[in-house]
Amino acid sequence: MNGKGSKQRVRWSKQFEDNYNNIFRKKKDKKMEKTIKDKCVMCGANTEYTKDTHIDFRTNYVEGAGQMCDDCHTKIY
Ligand SMILES: [Zn+2]
């Protein structure tokens, strides 16, 4: 009986640790994503918009294609 109890406790604390790590990692990833800028879908150049920027506030964004830089957008349109 005692053995079972301690086993469960160990398993639970491990799960808790995993969850904690997952949450911590996710938060870290989110923070990193914020600083990553959207790249031009045509040439791969960095644009001035981050992934968080709403499409409505962007220029050179093509629905269905993605973010384009000034050069590629003017070349195509
Ligand atoms: Zn481009």
Image: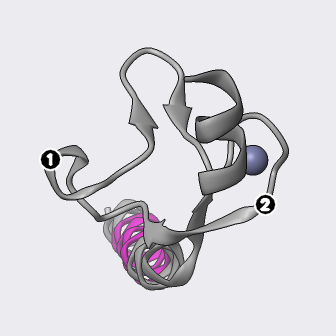
Q: Which residue is mark 1?
A: 56
Q: Residue at x 71, y 50 (%)?
A: 71
Is residue 40 found left or right of 17 in the rendered image?
Answer: right
Q: Which residue is mark 2?
A: 45
Residue occupying the far left of the picture: 56
For marks 1 and 2 on the same chain, the one whose residue lies earlier in the sequence: 2
Amino acid type of the residue that numbered disc 2 sits on in the rendered structure? Ala
Amino acid type of the residue that numbered disc 1 sits on in the rendered structure? Asp
The answer to whether mark 2 is within 8 Å of ligand 1 is yes
What is the number of the mark on residue 23?
none
Give the extent of the magenta segment: 9-24
Q: Is residue 53 above or below residue 24?
A: above
Q: Residue at x 36, y 74 (%)?
A: 23
Q: Residue at x 51, y 84 (%)?
A: 35
Crowding at mark 2 (Cα within 10 Å: few <14, some 14-19, many 20+): some
Q: Are marks 1 and 2 in contact (CB under 8 Å)?
A: no
Image coordinates of residue 73 in percent, x first then y, are 59, 38
Q: Secondary structure at mark 2?
A: loop
Residue 41 is covered by the magenta coloring: no
Image coordinates of residue 12 in percent, x first then y, are 35, 67
Residue 17 is covered by the magenta coloring: yes
Q: Secondary structure at mark 1?
A: helix
| Colour scheme in use | one colour
Magenta region, main secondary structure = helix
